[in-house]
Image: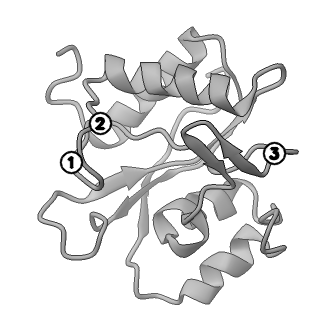
Amino acid sequence: MPFAGVSGAALLRRAIAAMREAGLSLRALSGVYRTPAWPPGAAQPDYFNAVVEIDAAGLTPQALFELLSGIERRFGRERRARWESRTLDLDIVAMEGFTGRFGDLELPHARAHERAFVLAPLAEIAPVWRHPVLSRSAAELLAALGTGQGYRRVDDLSPPGG
């Protein structure tokens, strides 16, 4: 496996490079956030999370999902059981103009509004982004969670094009 032993921000940087290599144009990158594994009490190491805003012009939700799933597989991802340990997890939180089910994908992501590990980096790069169903901003949704989900910003990622 080409990414064995790579974790944290280094793994996220390689995933971002793979997105660019796949032809995706990146508009914005959050910092790297460290959070306890999900679900709470999982016997897994902490997660490292970031949010990337992608210019998905011309891609359907299912096409973007398939492209990102291919990148996950390159990083050794196998989908066997919900919430199992994984090498890389690339989720689509939302796509402008799309709500509902698209094959294996639900937009917006069904539980993103409940998870600080999504909302903290999202609020960093798009604090006024509004959840298309709940009509609340990323910053408002994060504030509503309170402090119980323990997240902290631990690193920077290279800017788009950098």
Classify 10 Å Cα crowding around label 1: few (below 14), some (14-19), many (20 and above): some
Expressed as whole percent of the image width and height from the top left, the position of residue 89 reads 40, 41
Please determine whether, in this image, residue 29 is positioned above or below residue 137.
Answer: above
Color theme of the render: one colour
Front residue of 12/141: it is: 141
Classify 10 Å Cα crowding around label 3: few (below 14), some (14-19), many (20 and above): some
**Helix, strand or loop for disc 1:** loop
Whole-number angstrom distance, CA of label 1 to CA of label 3:
29 Å
Q: Quadrant of residue 59?
A: top right
The residue under the point 42% across, 68% down is: 152
Q: Are marks 2 and 3 in contact (CB under 8 Å)?
A: no
Q: In which quarter of the image is residue 64?
A: top right
Expressed as whole percent of the image width and height from the top left, the position of residue 108 reads 69, 55
Q: What residue type is labelled 3?
A: Phe
First of labels 1, 3 by sequence position: 1
Front residue of 77/30: it is: 77
The residue under the point 46% across, 26% down is: 69
Please determine whether, in this image, residue 122 is positioned above or below residue 138.
Answer: above
The numbered disc on residue 85 is 1
Q: Quadrant of the N terminus?
A: top left
Please determine whether, in this image, residue 146 is positioned above or below residue 25.
Answer: below
For label 3, the residue is 98
Q: Which amino acid does label 2 sit on?
A: Arg
For label 2, the residue is 79
The numbered disc on residue 71 is none
- Number of residue marks: 3
Q: Would residue 31 appear left or right of 75 to someone viewing this image?
A: right
Q: Which amino acid does label 1 sit on?
A: Ser
Whole-number angstrom distance, CA of label 1 to CA of label 2:
10 Å
Camera-nearest label, 1 or 2: 2
